[in-house]
Image (cartoon, helix red, strand yellow):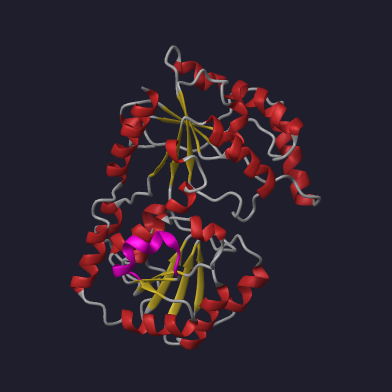
Amino acid sequence: MARLAADREVLWVNSIGLRRPRLNAGDARRLVRKVASMFRKGEATTALTPPEGISVASAKAVSWPGSRLARRINRRTIPASLKPFTDRFAPDRPIFWTSLPSAVDVIGQFNEAVVIYYAGDDFEGLAGVDHKPVGEMERELADRADLIIAASSTLAAKFPQAKTVILPHGCDLERFGTPVPRAPDLPSDRPVAGFYGSLADWLDYDLLRDAAVGCPEWDFVFIGNVSTDLRKLSRLTALPNVRLLGPRPHEALPSYVQHWQASLLPFVDNAQIRACNPLKLREYLAAGTPVISTAFPALSPYRDHVRTVATASELTVALRAALSDLPPTRAARQASVADESWDARAQDLKRLIDRAAA
């Protein structure tokens, strides 16, 4: 979007939730705050500082998939709260782009010229989502969209082929490929196997634990927020060679990934992972370090540059082989994503948008 904003105005609307409130104190407090914000005057603004050319807003909405009342409320409150921003687009008819099925409720409210659905996740398999009502909204959105852009072939297969195009993620090649100093909190006296991203239910914690036990000479480092049951994670984090560093800014990640000895993609095999096309795979390759992954469909174009494993013993063997990595192999990994910059993806996207809006 930052690249699209170079020659057009972009309004980025922050996520509308895809999970109904549960009967617990935490969700009750969030619901009260959400309802209170609906009656608060003023623009639906955010404290974030966006890239040049992009305005960012948080729309006033009720996050309750499957509720007809919530959908009726959202049809009124979302356009009204965004009006101070959308008035700036007049008299131009905007392009309506959404990556969330919940946005289907406001199609037609902005005099849009074209509706684009960017399908980046399998919402019917995504953890933390109310699958049935969100799936129904997604099918409705797919019917009403003029163009569907899917991040993977597995996702694309869900939608009408006549209006669906596959556009994988890009990569900030300069950021991840340009050498930077080592992060000061990255262990330096032993080999490091690293992962960054959400520590969620889609990681194979049993595989990681068994590998960490089998490789006591390695440190296993994880960067990111914890969004899984701590009991599931505790068997791994109890090991002396496992470290959770917490989240880090995106721009800081090269100082980790360029300097550890192996980059990990330790996923479970489920519907969500079979549909995913993780951005970090390209970032790992752009950094040049050895990549070790469990198998999933989007890995296919890069199999010559990624070591795939299914068991802890295979992961152990792959880690020890990574210590013998050579510069030409590192260069080949970087070359495998040389044509997949965000600039190249943005040019592809501009062509698709212009064609759909014609």
- Image quadrant occupied by the C terminus: top left
**Horizontal side of residue 268 vs 262, given as left or right:** right
Q: Residue at x 50, y 73 (%)?
A: 243
Q: Quadrant of residue 287?
A: bottom left
Position of 167 relative to 175 (above/below):
above
Q: Is residue 59 visible?
A: no
| Magenta-colored stretch includes residue 153 | no
Determine the main secondary structure of the stretch shown in magenta: helix
Percent coordinates x, y for residue 307 in the rendering:
36, 74
Q: Residue at x 81, y 50 (%)?
A: 23
The residues colored magenta run 295-306
Q: Residue at x 38, y 49 (%)?
A: 169
Percent coordinates x, y for residue 273 in the rendering:
51, 60
Q: Residue at x 55, y 51 (%)?
A: 122
- Image quadrant occupied by the N terminus: top left
Q: Which one is nearer the viewer's eye here, 92 or 271? A: 271
Percent coordinates x, y for residue 28 in the rendering:
78, 45
Position of 111 relative to 279 (above/below):
above
| Magenta-colored stretch includes residue 298 | yes
